[in-house]
């Protein structure tokens, strides 16, 4: 017995479901808004990090280049390196002046360049405008002495590479070259460098780090519970630490032994979330109120009349007690219901008739398009026979006619019936034998086919069409033409498809042909019947459940990709021929 449900209960259930869906939508929107805000912050942080990283690499590369140029080819540096202690003061003035002038032109705002030797006969440097505060004090001179002692005691392996050096709040990145007894040292103040770019930015802290330690903003990282391992791990993957309320993004540069990390606070996101929660509650309350108002309105104008009609129907059927109703047109309701029933029956019949006519029309279209393809190929074969007759190749003509008759038996069958992949490949081999008889230069046919797919169904001529195209448009090549067939199985959106990759090493598709293959017009279809008809036949057979792509391979040659749903017909091609 069919289950009977109450319209009023169904309406209440509908409103509850609608209210739940609305609630879920609001929650989803709130979560999505917070997520989008977080993504925007991450994107901006990564963009800023990329800018700072690029600037850092540029400065370090420039300073490295300066050191290398001075060390390897600057004559003044070579002179002082070899004879600084033996040259008179008046002879040292010119090379020292030239070096000072050179380093003044190359020193970055956050950096310094330092020349010195062990005997202190050479000891001069140039500061950038932002290096260690920008003002030269006695502390700076003492600091440069300290750097000098550091390099004099350094190992040979520390030279010619960037190393980090920290003293109190000062964190430097240094690179030194030594020739004889003379050093040239380029220095970058990391605090000054990042401060130049992030002035006024409080939500994001930037920390330089090495493989061993956090160099800048180490106190902030320790306060936030951020470890060096977290920062290093953020180089490969974004690190979200919701417990400590930060998002960490890092870039590491092995060539310089240093990395830059952006530490972004989530407090702004939580503030944004609180506002969203308040707005969500307000909207939810308003929507609940509107739902109750709408429900009361619908109950008044719909449920009550339905109850009256139900009571009247029971009365008419004799299943209930006589009741008073405000409606006087019960007969009209019955008439409408009868008319609707008849209309549904008529619609079903019309849909069935329309479906039958559509199938007949599609069948006729497929036959017409396949006939076009056949005529296109027949003309080519007749042309080949004509050329053979001109050359007097009687034996080839006999073989050609025999192969051509076999081909006709393949192509003349019901075009709504798919063929097995094995049959299509056999046909391609037959066609290959036909065109080999009339080709001045050999054509190589290479097949790589998943043998488990041979019994699956494909449209007829799906391989032969492209083999014919390759033969037609690559007749004047001086090297062997190779046509390759690769067929395998692939999963797309959880469904199995057969993938056909048909390629050659010829001249490839022209730009105009590629454009028209994507957006075919009538003129194109007139002159490229084979591919156009194949696409139309696939569209009629598979509707939208197939994909094609045409392009030129990087090494040259045309390449076509076809994805067809895997299906096996109950009727075989031989059965179809027997029916005929």
Image (cartoon, grey):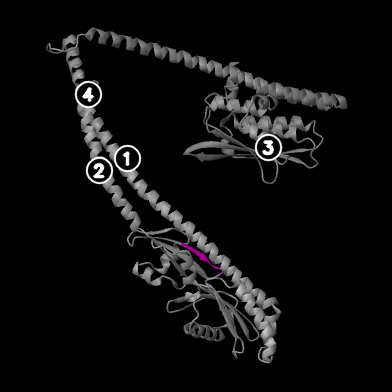
| Residue 69 in picture, x, y percent from top left | 66, 74
* Eye-nearest disc, 2 or 4: 2
**Residue 289's image quarter?**
top left
Disc 3 is placed on an element classified as helix
Residue drawn at point x = 58 percent, y = 27 percent? 538
Residue pointed to by mark 3: 511
Residue pointed to by mark 4: 7
| Residue 195 in picture, x, y percent from top left | 46, 68
Range of magenta residues: 250-255
* Eye-nearest disc, 2 or 1: 2
Residue 424 located within the stretch drawn in magenta = no
Is the residue marked by circle 4 packed among few (<14), some (14-19), or many (20+) residues within 10 Å?
Answer: few
Residue drawn at point x = 53 percent, y = 40 percent? 490
Instruction: Name above or below for residue 470 compared with residue 240.
Output: above
Real-space Cα separation, disc 4 to disc 1, in angstroms: 26 Å
Instruction: Name above or below for residue 204 compared with residue 436.
Output: below
Residue 254 located within the stretch drawn in magenta = yes
Tell me if I can see residue 409 in this picture.
Answer: no
Which badge, 2 or 4, comes first in the chain's sequence? 4
């Amino acid at each position: 017995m069919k289950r009977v449900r109450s319209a009023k209960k169904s309406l209440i259930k509908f409103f509850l479901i609608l209210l739940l869906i609305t609630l879920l939508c609001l929650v989803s929107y709130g979560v999505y808004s917070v997520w989008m805000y977080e993504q925007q912050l991450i994107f901006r942080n990564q963009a800023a990090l990329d800018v700072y990283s690029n600037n850092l690499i540029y400065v370090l590369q420039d300073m490295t280049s300066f050191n290398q140029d001075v060390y390897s080819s600057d004559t003044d540096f070579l002179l002082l390196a070899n004879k600084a202690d033996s040259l008179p003061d008046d002879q040292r003035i010119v090379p020292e002046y030239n070096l000072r002038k050179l380093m003044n032109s190359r020193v970055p705002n956050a950096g310094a360049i330092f020349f010195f030797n062990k005997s202190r006969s050479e000891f001069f440097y140039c500061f950038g405008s932002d290096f260690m505060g920008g003002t030269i004090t006695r502390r700076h001179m003492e600091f440069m002495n300290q750097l000098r002692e550091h390099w004099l005691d350094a190992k040979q392996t520390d030279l010619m590479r960037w190393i980090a050096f920290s003293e109190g709040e000062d964190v430097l990145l240094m690179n030194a070259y030594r020739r004889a007894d003379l050093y040239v040292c380029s220095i970058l103040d990391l605090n000054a460098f990042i401060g130049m770019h992030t002035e006024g930015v409080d939500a994001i802290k930037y920390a330089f780090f090495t493989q061993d330690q956090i160099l800048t903003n180490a106190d902030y990282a320790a306060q936030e519970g951020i470890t060096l391992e977290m920062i290093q791990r953020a180089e490969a993957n974004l690190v979200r630490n919701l417990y400590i309320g930060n998002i960490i993004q890092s870039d590491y540069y092995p060539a310089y032994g240093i990395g830059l990390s952006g530490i972004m606070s989530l407090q702004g996101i939580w503030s944004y979330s609180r506002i969203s929660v308040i707005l969500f509650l307000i909207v939810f309350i308003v929507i609940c109120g509107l739902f109750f108002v709408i429900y009361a309105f619908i109950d008044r104008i719909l449920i009550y009349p339905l109850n009256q009609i139900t009571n009247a129907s029971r009365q008419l059927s004799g299943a209930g007690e006589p009741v008073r109703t405000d409606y006087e047109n019960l007969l009209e309701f019955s008439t409408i219901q009868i008319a609707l029933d008849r209309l549904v029956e008529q619609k079903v019949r019309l849909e069935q008739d329309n479906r039958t006519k559509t199938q007949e029309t599609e069948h006729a279209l497929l036959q017409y398009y396949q006939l076009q393809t056949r005529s296109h190929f027949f003309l080519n074969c007749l042309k080949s026979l004509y050329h053979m007759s001109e050359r007097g190749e009687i034996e080839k003509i006999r073989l050609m006619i025999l192969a051509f008759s076999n081909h006709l038996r393949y192509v003349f069958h019901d075009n709504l019936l798919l063929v097995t992949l094995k049959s299509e490949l056999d046909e391609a081999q037959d066609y290959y034998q036909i065109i080999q008889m009339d080709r001045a230069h050999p054509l190589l046919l290479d097949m790589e086919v998943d043998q488990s797919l041979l019994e699956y169904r494909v449209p007829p001529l799906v391989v032969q069409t492209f083999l014919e195209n390759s033969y037609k448009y690559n007749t004047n090549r001086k090297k062997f033409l190779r046509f390759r067939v690769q067929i395998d199985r692939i999963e797309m959106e959880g469904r199995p498809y057969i993938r056909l990759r048909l390629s050659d090493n010829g001249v490839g598709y022209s730009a105009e042909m590629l454009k028209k293959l994507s957006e075919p017009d009538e003129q194109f279809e007139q002159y490229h019947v084979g591919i156009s008809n194949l696409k139309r036949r696939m569209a009629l057979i598979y509707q939208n459940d197939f994909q094609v792509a045409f392009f030129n391979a990087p090494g040259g040659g045309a390449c076509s990709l076809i994805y067809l749903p895997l299906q096996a017909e109950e009727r075989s091609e031989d059965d179809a021929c027997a029916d005929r």
